[in-house]
Image (cartoon, rainbow, N blue to C red):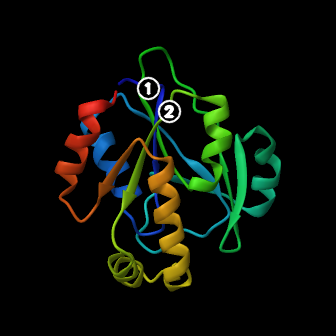
Amino acid sequence: MAASALVLIGPSGAGKSTLLRALSAELPDLRTVRTLTTRPRRPGETSDTHEFVSAAEFAERKAAALGVHRHYGHDYALPRLEAGPGVPVATCLRAVVLDRLRSLHPDLYVVAAEAPVPELLRRLGERGDRERAEPEVLQAELEAGRQLADLVLDTREPVADCLARIREVWP
């Protein structure tokens, strides 16, 4: 099944960015759409999935976004998923903006990246992201992702195996 865009969803620490980076390395023509965020960059974090901006710049640019939401005290916005004909597009986002995105792009292919809550907590602890280490919130997002996804991946599996499963169905 080919789709206009691949959307990776999942709770914090699920491996969305890791999968997107690996997919980008495998598909050099992939257009990655980054979310705009006022969240500060974590130490060592790349800008593969987010464009880090000031609150003032966010305020100027959010009108052009497909969806805006606030998460852990920071603003996030998804730019339009645009690319030329035949160019694959992929992004990572929170499940809360997926309905808005699907209303504009009904042919999305949605992949839920997940791992058990104890594993998510371990990963969040390793990256120093304790503010997002709320087991109930993580569990709720896992359950929401399963309901919304076309494919669910357990990211405890090797990245290459997860990519192979994605590539069986997209693009």
Q: Is residue 43 above or below residue 14?
A: below
Specify whether residue 133 is in view.
Answer: no
Q: Position of residue 164 (x, y in %)?
A: 20, 41
Specify whether residue 130 is in view.
Answer: yes
Quadrant housing residue 102: top right
Q: Are marks 1 and 2 in contact (CB under 8 Å)?
A: yes
The residue identified by callout 1 is: 3
Question: SS of the residue at dot 1?
Answer: loop
Seen at 66% across and 30% down, the residue is 104
Q: Is residue 170 left or right of residue 158?
A: right
Seen at 33% across and 68% down, the residue is 115
Q: Quadrant of the C terminus?
A: top left
Q: Is residue 95 left or right of residue 8?
A: right
The residue identified by callout 2 is: 108
Q: Position of residue 106 (x, y in %)?
A: 58, 28
Seen at 77% across and 62% down, the residue is 55
